[in-house]
Amino acid sequence: MKKTFILSCTVLLTLCLAGCKSSDKEPAYKDANLSIEKRVNDLLSRMTLDEKILQLNQYATGPNDNPNNIGEVIRRLPSEIGSLIYRTEDPELRNQLQKVAVEETRLGIPIIFGYDVIHGFRTIFPIPLAQAMSWNPELVKQAASVAAKEAWYSGIDWTFAPMIDVARDGRWGRIAEGYGEDPYTTAVFTEAAVQGFQGEDMSEPEKLAACLKHFAGYGACEGGRDYGYTEISRQTLWDTYLPPYEAGVKAGAATVMSAFTNISGVPATINKYLLTDVLKEKWGHDGFIVSDWGAIGQLLNQGATADSMECAVRAFNAGLEMDMMSDCYGKFLKKALEEKKVSLAQIDESVRRILRVKFRKGLFENPYTPSTTPEERFLLPESKALAQKLAEETIVLLKNENHILPLSSKNIGVIGPMVKDNYDVMGCWTAHGNKADVETIWEGLQKEFEGKANLIYAKGCEIEGDDHTGFSEAMNVARRSEIVLLFLGESRWFTGEDANRSQIALPVIQQELLRKIKETGKPIVLVVSSGRAVELGTVEPLCDAIVEMWHPGTVAGTPIARVLSGAVNPSGKLALTFPFSGGQMPIYYNARPGGRPLQGKYTDIQTAPLYEFGHGLSYTTFTYGELKASATTLNKQDKLTVSVDVTNSGDRDGAEVVHWFIRDPVCSITRPMKELKHFEKQMIKVGETKTFTFDVDLLRDFGFVDENGDRFLEAGEYQIIVKDQVLKVEVK
């Protein structure tokens, strides 16, 4: 009896100890050895409804939160919030907010901190539109990687970039944020940017989660008016506006942002076809979608909803997981569940997607930002060197009469409002770029021409306004010079969000300055710093050379100085069309042909653009050989290789970009007059010949897409176009 009692006690004690051990065991979601899906599901199973809904919301903190108010900021923000927009470059506040979320809440779910890191964080690179002119995806990838590094050390986990809206109307201010007018070009640079931001594994240090925006068709706003209406057919969505997003998803982009725009009567914020049918079901994207700032609440203004409750319900049911700054989900989603307007299964799936990204980002293992000094993370020599290199390759030589460039003069007049500017040259969306860090054009010219030429400066005028008092000094400088470098351009505020302009010509005061300088009879090199293709039709005849330097960022002076001196041979080519007149907008190279090719034109201006897509001069000459094909008659399953030899027949080493276009003369769905399908950039030394190759996948490159996004390939003639050469291929 005694032995039985002792044995029973032993068994009970063992069971109690085992129970204690089991209860003390860490929950599965904290076990980094388990798969992310197992961790997500375990964490989700432990969450209350309130905790789930908080994960679906994003609030903002940042520039108004000084160190004296950190405690108040932490108390003001819910510790279980899913995400915060973090608008400062010091990680201290972020780490304190994260500490409360991770160490003082029931489940310890980390916050994901986001910010608009568009073309740099503190080291500002050329605007994305300019980056496309480089035709160098590897450089763009490296620039995104540097931006990610600086942002990550400043407390950022997630960037609202890249902006990949195909844009064909220069009046739209946000054209500066994307990669131009061509779907293929934009798709290639999208992939490069995503890879740069995220790396091979975005949980690694110095990497950010990327966000493809704005999904989709935002660049088609009527008249270039931001937030406006767009009329886009399903087929046009697929052939023009969706290819960059599909490329970004394939590249592994963690998140997507919905657009503000209203697409054919259905705002993107509640567009189930785009958000669910295409993005999630057709493409298999398993990250999450965030709204643009306040966009869910703005459905009221768009006439799509009657109240904020309906805003929340319609956006959520369309497939939008995170509410940025509307607080519609926070206020109304629980009530919507009670009224059975949304389901718990939908909430769980949305939270699952957000948690999945947080696990992939490594926030559960490494929730805090390490402590570093600004000197350790910002404006490193290698970062500035990369910014210089990228800026050099973005510069486009548009005109060069009588080979006036590169400069050989000894007395050079340097005139214009952009010369000593250290603010506007950074462009729009400059994150934490500081004008004190900017190397001005003047500083770059002084460094480049020291001991070689005498530089004489006059500002002439401001970027805008009607103050002509500086004209006299500018004309005196011109008269004393052999040649005039005239630096004109746009303010940073001429482009960016809600920066739409009815006129895209240079401001009147700048045009007047140009005409006054022309009166001196001195040769003029016009250098334009802008965020779009500006209208130059009326001023082009007044200039001997025209150079587009865009908004170059932190390292503004040295790149343009080296191009003007000839130390760098310009290799940039246009990724968008320069109109002769703003009245031609929208204008783009890959339009569909009209029924009467010689009619239907404007009668008061020329039909042709001033500079075509792909235009860009060099200080050397390139001679193209004959296009060669591995076959000219193929079956649909065959592969095709096309090549062309390019020889540097000039007297300077230079880089050349070969653009490969295709044309399908007859198709069941009419197609553009030509479509870019491949490009390649190579450095070619004097006298050297390089072979450029295009490996054609017939379905991918000759095929087209229908209104369902399905590719098809029809039998018939296809044309491959390089420069003025056309190679015909027959597909059976």
Image: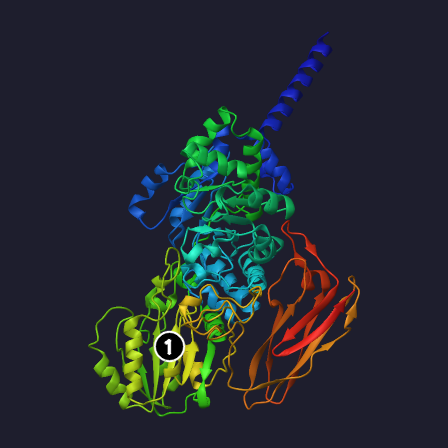
Quadrant in which the C terminus is drawn:
bottom right
Look at the numbered disc 1 and give the secondary structure of its residue.
loop
Q: Residue at x 78, y 70 (%)?
A: 633
| Front position in the image: 49 or 93 | 49
Residue 611 % position (x, y): 48, 75
* Closest to the observer, 548 or 682: 548
The image quadrant of residue 543 is bottom left
Can residue 216 be seen from the camera position used here? Answer: yes
Residue sitting at 51 percent across and 59 percent down? 166
Whether residue 27 is visible here, answered yes or no, is no
Task: Please identify the quarter of the rendering in which residue 470 is found.
Answer: bottom left
Instruction: Give residue 94's position: percent from left, percent from top.
Output: 41, 47
Compared with residue 456, is residue 39 higher up or lower down, i.e. above or below? above
Judging by the rendered image, the residue that carries numbered circle 1 is: 538
Give residue 518's position: percent from left, percent from top.
31, 85
Q: Is residue 371 above or below residue 635?
A: above
Which residue is most to the left?
A: 469
- Three-letter amino acid code at the position of disc 1: Thr
Q: Of all residues shown, which one is farthest toward the top?
A: 1
- Residue 51, above or below 200: above
Instruction: Say how many tags the image has.
Output: 1
Q: Quadrant of residue 175?
A: bottom left
Find residue 463 and report its horizontal and vertical position in percent: 29, 70
- Protein image colouring: rainbow
Looking at the image, which residue is at 60% across and 32% down? 25
> Quick one: quadrant of the N terminus?
top right
Against 300, is 525 above or below? below
Q: Is residue 709 left or right of residue 227?
A: right
Name the residue nearer the viewer: 574 or 435: 574
User: Residue drawn 51% across and 86% down?
Assistant: 619
Rate crowding at label 1 as few (under 14), some (14 to 19) or many (20 or more) other CA atoms within 10 Å.
few
